[in-house]
Image (tube, helix red, strand yellow):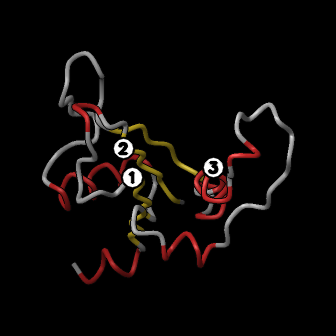
Amino acid sequence: MWTRFYDMHSGGDTKIEGKQVIFIEASEAEAIDIFENTFGHHPDDVTCPCCGENYYYRESDSLEKASRFDRCEMTRTYETWPIYKRIDNPPASMEELEANDEVLIIRAEDKAEA
């Protein structure tokens, strides 16, 4: 299982060193605990009362499924925006996702070493 945490920019900025999205290899409940222990705050914390929770999060069966939206966003161009222009760009590869500076991936083996 993988849980995707998407920074909602509540309060105007990303909460963790410019990371827009964080993937943790764990069920949602376990990933929330890992998130809180790793970063020192809960993803449901509210930085700005008018903006709501700091993160949106959701569990998926695999990293490929959890990251599909983000990988598609990485290949979107001016010509494919707005989304109603039906031009199918393939999603970015998993390697491209891992190389993206705005993405943090925490695998099970990384948790075991911590």
Q: Residue furthest left?
A: 40
Residue 68: name its quadrant.
bottom right
In this picture, residue 59 sits left or right of residue 91 = left
Residue 64: name its quadrant.
bottom right
Give whichever of discs 2 and 3 has the lower sequence position. Answer: 2
Q: Quadrant of the image for the N terminus?
A: bottom right
Disc 3 is placed on an element classified as helix
Q: CA distance from mark 1 to mark 2?
A: 5 Å
Numbered badge on residue 20: 1
Q: Amino acid at mark 1?
A: Gln
Could you tell me residue 66's position as x and y percent? 59, 55
In this picture, residue 95 sits left or right of residue 113 = right
* Position of 36 relative to 85 (above/below): below
* Position of 69 relative to 9 (above/below): below
Disc 2 is placed on an element classified as strand
Could you tell me residue 101's position as x and y percent? 40, 68
Mark 1 in CB contact with mark 2 (< 8 angstroms) = yes
Pointer 2: residues within 10 angstroms few (<14), some, or many (20+)? many
- The answer to which of 10 and 78 lies nearer the viewer is 78
Mark 3 in CB contact with mark 1 (< 8 angstroms) = no
Q: Residue at x 42, y 73 (%)?
A: 107
Disc 1 is placed on an element classified as loop
Q: Residue furthest front?
A: 78
Numbered badge on residue 100: none
Location of mark 3 (residue): 69
Q: Amino acid at mark 2?
A: Asp
Could you tell me residue 6's position as x and y percent? 42, 45
Give whichever of discs 1 and 2 has the lower sequence position. Answer: 2
Numbered badge on residue 7: 2
